[in-house]
Amino acid sequence: MTASNQQDQVKFPVPPGRLCNWYYKGALDLEPRLAMVTHSTSNGELNLTIHEENRQNHILVRGVRHKDDPFHGTHPVHKTEAGVWDYLPGLDPRKIATRLTAAEAGMEELTKVLQQEQAASRPPGPDAGAAYRRTVAKEQANAQ
């Protein structure tokens, strides 16, 4: 697999209709503009409709790649011409997957602890009650 093909394999999934942040000229230090995804391609490019505050007109931008896409390393002009996009805060699937994995691991540990606590606090079973009654009956018989 060539370097070009590896870059095409990098995917940042965003379905059409989803909102994202768009950075003008790829400048991450500027405030992002709200954008709606109108089309996504298999190579990771998005077509966006940029919504600017206090404006009635929208800007259409084609071929925008994610800010972390390695494509920008070999095509820096593309970043400047199309800008870059990023997920809205809290919606990056890579970070969500990491948080879910950590949460699942924590849930497994919590489940084990709860099972151990439940086993330790269970009342004696029916056999234990019968054994207790037999012991009491023997003690009473011996006391007479």
Image (cartoon, rainbow, N blue to C red):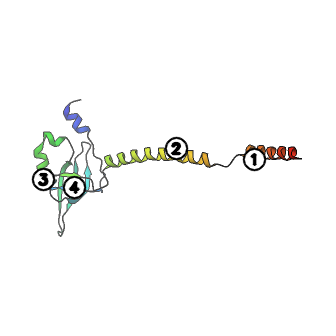
Which of the two labelled residues, at mark 3 and mark 1, occupies the earlier sequence position?
A: 3
Q: Residues within 10 Å of mark 1 (few under 14, many from 20)?
A: few
C-alpha distance separating marks 4 and 3: 14 Å
Q: Nearer the viewer, residue 127 or 102?
A: 127
Left or right position of 118 against 28: right
Q: Which mark is residue 48?
A: 4
Residue at far right of view? 144
| Type of the residue with mark 4 | Leu
C-alpha distance separating marks 3 and 1: 77 Å
Which of the two labelled residues, at mark 1 and mark 2, occupies the earlier sequence position?
A: 2
Which of the two labelled residues, at mark 2 and mark 3, occupies the earlier sequence position?
A: 3
- Answer yes or no: do the residues labelled 2 and 3 have beta carbons within 8 Å? no
> Residue at image x 43%, y 44%?
105
| Type of the residue with mark 1 | Gly
Report the residue marked by disc 2.
112
C-alpha distance separating marks 1 and 2: 28 Å
C-alpha distance separating marks 4 and 2: 47 Å
Report the residue marked by disc 3.
25
Q: Nearer the viewer, residue 72 or 94?
A: 94
Report the residue marked by disc 1.
129
| Type of the residue with mark 3 | Lys
Q: Residues within 10 Å of mark 2 (few under 14, many from 20)?
A: few
- Answer yes or no: do the residues labelled 4 and 3 have beta carbons within 8 Å? no
Which of the two labelled residues, at mark 4 and mark 2, occupies the earlier sequence position?
A: 4
Mark toward the viewer: 2 or 3: 2
| Type of the residue with mark 2 | Lys
x and y percentages locating residue 49 in the rendered image: 21, 58
Q: Which mark is residue 143?
A: none
Left or right position of 76 against 39: left
